[in-house]
Image (cartoon, rainbow, N blue to C red):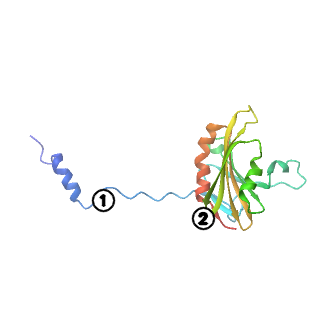
Amino acid sequence: MTPRFLLPAALLLPLAACSGSPAAAPSAAPTPPAVTVGGPGSACELPVTLGVADSWKPKAVSFAADDPFAELARRGPLTMACEIDAKPAGNIGFLRVWTGAGQDLRPALQAFIGTDVVSPQFTDVTIGGKPGVEVVYQSKSQLDDELEKERAFAVPTAEGMVAVVLDSFDDTEHEEMLPAYELAKSTLTVTG
C-alpha cells in the first residue's frame, strides 16, 4: 500500500509544469574582480584600470634614472609600470603592465618581444572598447633553452600605449595563469 503523501511520478511532472515557477533561474551576472589597479589611489596608477585575480598582489615599478637596474624595466619602446605577483596565489610568474609613447601597437609589441621569438601570431582585438593588438609566441627559457608560451596585448590611450604581459615560469604555469590574464583583458578600461 502506497502512503497517502506520495504521488506517482507520472502525476508529479504535470504538476511541476503547472506550478508557475520558472524551470531554471537565470544565470547570475559575472562577479566583478575584488581588486582593480590603475585608478587613483590603487597600487599602480595607470591610464587604464583592470581587474586583478584573487590573491595576486600588484605593486608599482619605478627606477631612478641612474639606477643600474633601470634597463631591466625597458624593452623596446615600453617601460614597466606595474607588476602583479602571482606567488600569493601559488604561481611563480607575474602579469606586468608596460607603458610607452605613441600609438603604433604592432611595431611596439614586435620591438618588445624582439627577434629571437618563435612563431609570433599577432591578432587585432577589441579591448575595453578600443582597437588593440594581441601577440602569442614562444621564446627560449633562460634556464634550459626550452620553448615557452608567452602572450601580451596592447591598447592605445590618450597618454600613449599600455601593454599587459603574462610572464610565467613555464608552460604549465602559463596555462594556470591564463585566467588572470584573460580577467585583466576582459576588465580593462581606458581612463586616460
Spot occupied by residue 1 in the image (x, y as percentages of width and height): 8, 40
- Residue annotated with mark 2: 129
Spot occupied by residue 40 in the image (x, y as percentages of width and height): 69, 65
Identify the residue shown where x is 39% and y is 59%. Answer: 26
Which residue of the protein is positioned furthest toward the top in this rendering? 144
Q: Secondary structure at mark 1?
A: loop
Find residue 160 and report its image quarter.
Answer: bottom right
Task: Tell me if I can see residue 78 in this picture.
Answer: yes
Spot occupied by residue 138 in the image (x, y as percentages of width and height): 68, 41
Spot occupied by residue 148 in the image (x, y as percentages of width and height): 68, 38
- Residue annotated with mark 1: 22
Mark sitting earlier along the chain (2/1): 1
Where 168 sits versus 17, above or below?
above
Identify the residue shown where x is 62% and y is 55%. Answer: 184
Where 142 sits versus 9, above or below?
above
Q: Amino acid at mark 1?
A: Pro
